[in-house]
Every structure is written in structure tokens, then in C-alpha cells.
Image (spheres, rainbow, N blue to C red):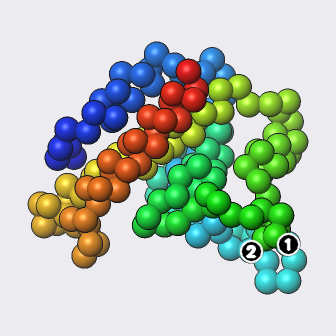
């Protein structure tokens, strides 16, 4: 219902994803938009005290939120920025590997099999959301004044999701 243009990378991903879903069938509550901007930290202690914006929450795979939160390590989104090219040692920001390792340690996982699949799915999902925003912009019923400019964002994200899918195999 939100499709506006043919985006070959999206079509390839739609075909590829169901055939490549990892065997890990864990389920949990998934936030759906887990990122720094939806987090509130304690003012004097290094700890998270709240997570906001739960309207996209659902029952899903626990790695969905982790992968969504890690997209910025792989994709330099022109609309939101990212961490591509950041000097992690100088900034004190953990690398993707360190961040994922800490997650695994905290939840009792040895490792994550097929991590690129989860990243690809998250970027694909964001591309789909961008396509919906773009469609509403074209239809004149978007909540954002710049929604009609999201067409390039969708294509950009779809290309990155396809690259991650290729990395996954």
C-alpha cells in the first residue's frame, strides 16, 4: 500500500529474507524503535532510567532491537547521521563488536549467529518505514513537512540492507 516506485533492492530483499531467517526462534518484547534518542539517562550516574516511544512495540525477536540500535555503525544515514568513520578510541564510544559483545555478556549469549541478517532486516524495515513516510508525503497526508523528500532515503537504505544481506550470505 505504501509502494511508490520500483526499488529492485527491496524486491530482492523481500525474496531473500524468508529463505534466510536464522534458526534462533527466541521471542521477547521488542521495542521497535530502540535508539539513543528514545532513552533517558540518570543525570549523575551512568545508567539508563527510562525508554520512551513504545508505540512500535510488539512480541518479536530480542535481536531486532539490538540490530536496530546498531544500524548507525554500518549506515551513515543522511537524515540521521551515524557512526561510520568515527574514531571510537578518541570518542569513548564502543565499537559495534564491543557493544554487541557487552549485550551478549549481559543476556548470557555466547555469540550471535548470522548477525548481518538482523542488521539487514533492521535497515530493510527502516527503508519500508521511509517508503511509507514518502507515500504519505506524496498523498498530502503526512505529519512531516518534508515527507515528500523521503524517496531517496528509501532507496539509500534499501541498497544498504541488500549489501548487509549479501554479507549474511
Q: CA distance from mark 1 to mark 2?
A: 7 Å
**Residue 129 at x, y = what percent?**
36, 51
Depicted 47 relative to depicted 29: above or below? below
Q: Which residue is mark 1?
A: 46
Residue 52 left/right relative to 98? left
**Element under disc 1:** loop
Q: Quadrant of residue 22?
A: top right
Disc 1 and disc 2 in contact, CB within 8 angstroms:
yes
What residue is drawn where x is 66% and y is 22%? 24
**Residue 24 badge:** none
Q: Residue furthest left?
A: 139
* Residue 69 visible: no
Q: Residues within 10 Å of mark 1 (few under 14, many from 20)?
A: few
Residue 45 left/right relative to 67? right
Depicted 127 relative to depicted 35: above or below? above
Please state which of residues 29 and 92 is positioned toward the viewer in this rendering.
Answer: 92
What residue is drawn where x is 32% and y is 48%? 155
What residue is drawn where x is 38% and y is 50%? 156
**Count of marks overlaid on the render:** 2
**Residue 41 badge:** 2
What residue is drawn where x is 44% and y is 34%? 162
**Residue 30 at x, y = what percent?**
59, 45
Amino acid at each position: 500500500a505504501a509502494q511508490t516506485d520500483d526499488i529492485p533492492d527491496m524486491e530482492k530483499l523481500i525474496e531473500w529474507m524468508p529463505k534466510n531467517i536464522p534458526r534462533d526462534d527466541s521471542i521477547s518484547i521488542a521495542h521497535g524503535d530502540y535508539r539513543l534518542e528514545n532513552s533517558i539517562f540518570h543525570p549523575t550516574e551512568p545508567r539508563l532510567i527510562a525508554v520512551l516511544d513504545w508505540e512500535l512495540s510488539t512480541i518479536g525477536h530480542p535481536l531486532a532491537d539490538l540490530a536496530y540500535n546498531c544500524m548507525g555503525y554500518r549506515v551513515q544515514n543522511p537524515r540521521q547521521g551515524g557512526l561510520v568513520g568515527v574514531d571510537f578510541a578518541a570518542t569513548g564510544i564502543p565499537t559495534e563488536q564491543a557493544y554487541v559483545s557487552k549485550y551478549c555478556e549481559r543476556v548470557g549469549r555466547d555469540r550471535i549467529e548470522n548477525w548481518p541478517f538482523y542488521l539487514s532486516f533492521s535497515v530493510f524495515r527502516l527503508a519500508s518505514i521511509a517508503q511509507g513516510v514518502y507515500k504519505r508525503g506524496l498523498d498530502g497526508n503526512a505529519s512531516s513537512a518534508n515527507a515528500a523528500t523521503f524517496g531517496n532515503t528509501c532507496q539509500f537504505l534499501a541498497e544498504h540492507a541488500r549489501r548487509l544481506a549479501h554479507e549474511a550470505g
